[in-house]
Amino acid sequence: MKTNLSKIKSEIDNYVQESNLTELQVVEKLKDYYFNKKVNENLKLYKKGKKKVRDITKDLKLSPRKFYAILEKKNIQHKKYNKENNKENNKES
């Protein structure tokens, strides 16, 4: 395990020397890349109806509101829940 980790560290150090980024910036870019990769995998399953929002948000450790923002950003159809209409309907009953 340590040898693999040392290889990764050395690759990051080499990349830092070639670019004008710091080590933390490189790690942040990698984090963003792998998060987006995981989101795209889950979106494919969501589109097929194989995975629910609840499960996706639990796996990705983000709020449903942020997940719906991702859906809107990528122009993916989803059902919208409108609290205000439900409050008005409950008052009339």
Image (cartoon, helix red, strand yellow):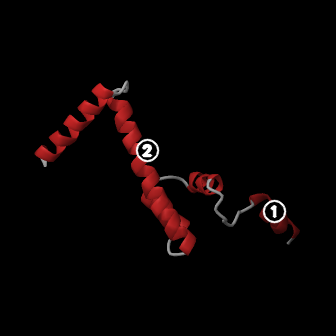
Vertical order, 28 against 36 (above or below)? above
Residue named by callout 2: 32
- Left or right of 91? Residue 51 is left
**Do tag 2 and tag 1 residues touch (Cβ < 8 Å)?**
no
Q: Quadrant of the C terminus?
A: bottom right
2 sits to left or right of 25: left
Count of numbered circles in the view: 2
Q: What is the three-letter code of the residue carrying label 1? A: Asn
Q: Position of residue 62 (x, y in %)?
A: 50, 52
- Mark 1: give few (<14), some (14-19) or many (20+) Cα within 10 Å: few
Q: Which residue is mark 1?
A: 85
Point 34% across, 37% down: residue: 27
Determine whether 17 is above or below 56 in the image. Answer: above
Circle 1: element type? helix
Residue 72 rendering spot, x and y as whole percentages: 65, 55
Q: Amino acid at mark 2?
A: Asp
Query: Element at badge 2?
Result: helix
Mark 2: give few (<14), some (14-19) or many (20+) Cα within 10 Å: few
Q: Which label belongs to residue 76?
A: none
Residue nearer the viewer, 54 or 10: 10
